[in-house]
Image (spheres, grey):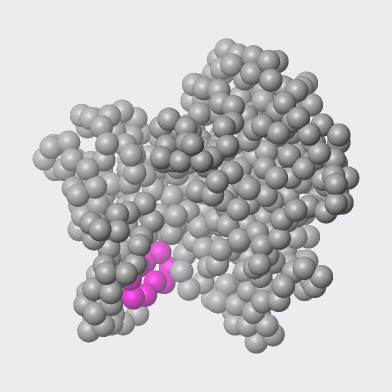
Amino acid sequence: MTPAAHDAPAWLADDRRHVWHPYASAVAPAPVLPVVGARGTRLLLADGRELVDGMSSWWAAVHGYRHPVLDAALHEQIDRFSHVMFGGLTHQPAVELCRLLVGCTPEPLQRVFLSDSGSVGVEVAAKLALQYWQGRGRPERNRLLTIRGGYHGDTVGAMSVCDPVTGMHQLFRGYVPQQLFVDRPRTPFAEPFDPTDLDQLRAALAADGERIAAVIVEPVVQGAGGMWFYSPAYLAGLRQLCDDHGVLLIHDEVATGFGRTGRWLAAEHAGVVPDILVLGKALTGGYLSLAATLCTDEVAAGVSAAPGGAFMHGPTFMGNALASSVALASVRLLLDGDWQADLRRLEAGLTAGLAPARALPGVADVRVLGGIGVIELTEPVDMAVVQPAVVRRGAWVRPFGRLVYAMPPYVSTEEDLATVTAAMVAAVREQVGVPA
């Protein structure tokens, strides 16, 4: 990869003047690093520096960058066509992808609705649940129940089930629908389950079950809401309570699907299956935006029995042929490879590399599950200190809140993991004022 350093100053100035980056101020933007190339686990900056990517481009690029199989899938498809509308038309890449997703997810999930992003996939799931109850003659069942500490996306319906107090969307409280919340489970992933964790959920379903359409959760791992890993036994109890009250269960596995927690789906840690499942991020290996919302035949029948006889959602780029083709190649790469061994390697490397942070003052917790490694601080991360400190040490992670965390590509080597974790620990040392 050859840096285009001579181009960087001009377009960086245009970036600062015109480009609005996510979760950033338009009038006082934070510095951004210009990327001019990427291959494997490396990001190449305009000044010639290389960074080991510890983020998988927000958890999506599980195969790394410029993977020859994924590149070839896109080249082959673009020689046929890049996109056609999915209303009234269909094409082989989307059909094969849906068949593959049904084949690699639990048996009751038979129907697949493709959309543009994880947030939209969550919107689709919520609308499926509400329209299902319309079709079953129970329109009063129009509320969602969820647990605090969650994050499900930035669109309106998705925002409504993000944490209303500690989440990112407090500014929109008067705009988003008001849903029902219970406290998140307190029992950590690997500890004996405290059954009282289910008490609030049980009470909420007993009190409001007749107006609840569905419960939506991120199984086992609450991602952008705090990287909290909770007991799989909670999921099993939740599934039983939903069955007892006739409430649909939605699993948001946008972040955790395709092996990130060490299981193909995070819900496998609990041995449970939802009525509706949302997948995204790693679906295309980080190449293009695509999500899939799967549901059971029972849900599909209820939705189709609602007035109009059709599901009322239709993204313009639904079933995009390029995205479907690269997703098909990405999922097959995982299924044909040894992703379990990759995740064991990631878990071992993250565990060993982050262990020194446990002894640092100001560190509340260090936790690892599969390909997720987290250092949780007692105070908010000082981005002006931590982000440059990580970059100086040749790595890229993107902290938020009180968390310095990594979700590296599955192809990361032991050397890659050592670089990323050492940079994270050193950056935390700088924030808390402990000499190296």
108, above or below 3, in the image: above
Majority secondary structure of magenta residues: strand
Residue ID at (31%, 28%): 364
> How far from the left and from the top, in percent, is residue 207?
68, 15
Residue ID at (67%, 73%): 321
Q: Quadrant of the C terminus?
A: top left
Q: Quadrant of the N terminus?
A: bottom left
Quadrant of the image occupied by residue 196: top right
Nearest the eye: 272 or 205: 205
147, above or below 222, in the image: above
Q: Which residues are magenta?
A: 34-43
Q: Is residue 360 visible?
A: yes
> How far from the left and from the top, in percent, is residue 44?
32, 71
Residue 39 counted in the magenta span = yes
Quadrant of the image occupied by residue 88: bottom right
Residue ID at (24%, 80%): 10
Q: Is residue 329 visible?
A: no
Residue ID at (70%, 28%): 212
Q: Farthest residue toward the bottom? A: 79
> How far from the left and from the top, in percent, is residue 329?
64, 68
Nearest the eye: 213 or 414: 213
The total of numbered circles placed on residues is: 0
Quadrant of the image occupied by residue 432: top left
Residue 236 placement, left or right of 378 = right
Q: Farthest residue toward the front? A: 174
Residue 400 counted in the magenta span = no
Nearest the eye: 175 or 132: 175
Residue 91 placement, left or right of 47 = right
